[in-house]
Amino acid sequence: MSSSATQLAPKKQEEAKPKLAVLLVEDNQFDAELVLRALQQSGYDVSGTVVQDEATFLKALRANPPEIVLADYNLPDWTGMETLNVLLREGLDIPVILVSGALGDVTAVESIKRGITDYVLKDGLARLPQVVRRALREKYERGLRHLAEEDLAKKVDELARSNADLEQFANVASHDLQEPLRMVAAYTQLLAERYRGKLDEDADKFIGYASEGALRMQMLIQDLLAFSRVGRNATPNRSIDCNSVMVEVLQTLSTPIQESGALIKFDALPTVCANHTQIVQVFQNLIGNAIKFRGIDPPEISITSEKQDGQWLFTMRDNGIGIPKESLENVFVVFQRLHGRTEYPGNGIGLAICKKIIERYGGRVWVESQVGNGSAFKFTLPPEPADEFKREQP
Amino acid sequence: MSTAQVEILLVDDSKEDVDLTLRALRAENLANNIFVARDGEEAMDFLFCSGSHAGRSFEHPPKLVLLDLKLPKIDGLQLLKRIKNDERTKNICVVMMTSSREERDLAIGYSLGVNSYLQKPVDFTEFRQMVKSAVLYWLAINRPPLNSGGELLGTDAAHHTLTGHTK
């Protein structure tokens, strides 16, 4: 079976020879015929146009764009290298192969540097079909790569635009929401001041609910604004010593740490390249959460770091209540809360902000956890540039 | 009230907001000499004695402008620019008041010469406190330069007693 198939194959190729449109720049008619014949003999159905100067080259190029240009290096009125400039001007990506009687090594190298695909000596024409095939294949692959790159660039562009739109939406929405919200809050407060105890019990309760609702909405709006500002922070990155970040965060969180009796341990932490305020925010949100979502025992929190794939990998481990498996990804979504407001206060913005900040620096954040067994929040951050340098020096 | 006596020009298009501000001022007895402009254009006419306020004189400028940022016709920042770029009005204290804090507006405001930039708190008690502090500061504690309208005239008794505190 397989042998009959291989027998058929060459016959089939005979029937349908691949077509090849060649534009030949050559002053010697005899050489031109030799070149075309070499291609024909190798199995191409060649259609060739022969020109000698720039004007006819351009005319042929426009009338019938070839798949490949074969050019003699030395012509009486022109040179093969000039074809490159014409192709560039016309915006055409067509491989040019120099076919020359003699070509010094230096000239050959120089030609290829300037954009010639390859060269073949006239006394070595047997090599021509192979060179042509490779040039066409390379062009095809270049085209595919170009398409893929264009596609990728378009997607990156779309993503960036959609992110920017979203940020702008959050920003504008939250600004414009502030004004009517202030009215609701202020006038409900005025109502309360003037009529508390003068209407019935229900009225006082309703006014109270309205005030609370307005204040909670204000907090949501502020959180949304903070979230939308993460990407708008334009301060340049600098080296941030995470140990000093920890000192600052422990200071800020001193009250909840004392109240909960939290024990916080951390290794000598590295220096990362980022924005100071944002890194403080990440550490503060994560440690704050570890304290907030504590179990029966006082919180024990450890912060460690290690170098992994050229990035710093941080692990914040706690002995808190843990997170159910199905919610491990949800916890990073804006306004996603796993508990009732009375159990654990908050709007569910902290981890979303952490994620946005970390991803802004090309890092990743995720959590490993089991209910009742604590959580380990892991995130990566880029090292400071000098750190990379030091690492590569012996 | 004659517009010649106006101490405070309040520029705000929201009647609810104007009501809140007036309420806050009234509680401190500061709402007597106040004129309310409902858009940037009316504020311009008032300050530059043109249009419906053509009869006014530059000799009696308000001592303080409480300016909302988002206004119809001429917005708050544009109005601020006109006030601070004109020799006749540039010494008037301008306090911008907005619902939301936008860093860019803040930066532009200060570069145009705003005297104060305040964010109106959602909580009414805090709002009342803020309006009171700001107005008392600019009218009673702060000393404007001699060439500003109020000092130049020297006829405003209230002003004399107010500035007297700082001497």
Image: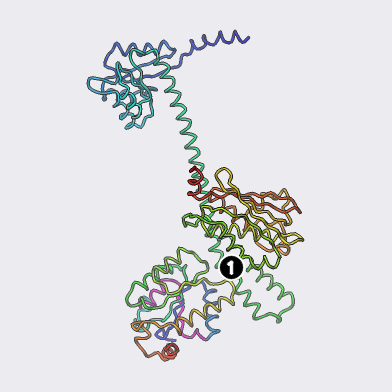
The image shows residue B36, relative to residue A351, as above or below, that is below
Is residue A62 shown to the viewer in this render?
A: no
Q: Quadrant of the N terminus of chain A?
A: top right
Outermost front residue: A394
Q: Is residue B130 above or below residue A340?
A: below
Percent coordinates x, y for residue A214 in the rendering: 63, 68
Is A96 magenta? The answer is no
Q: Is residue A235 above or below residue A363?
A: below
Q: Residues within 10 Å of mark 1 (few under 14, many from 20)?
A: some
**Which residue is tagged 1?**
A181
Q: Is residue B3 visible?
A: yes
Say which element carries label 1: helix
Rendering coords of residue A191 (x, y %):
64, 77
The numbered mark 1 sits on a residue in which chain? A
Per the rendered image, the range of residues in magenta is B29-50
Q: Quadrant of residue B55?
A: bottom left
Please state which amino acid type lies under the numbered disc 1.
Leu
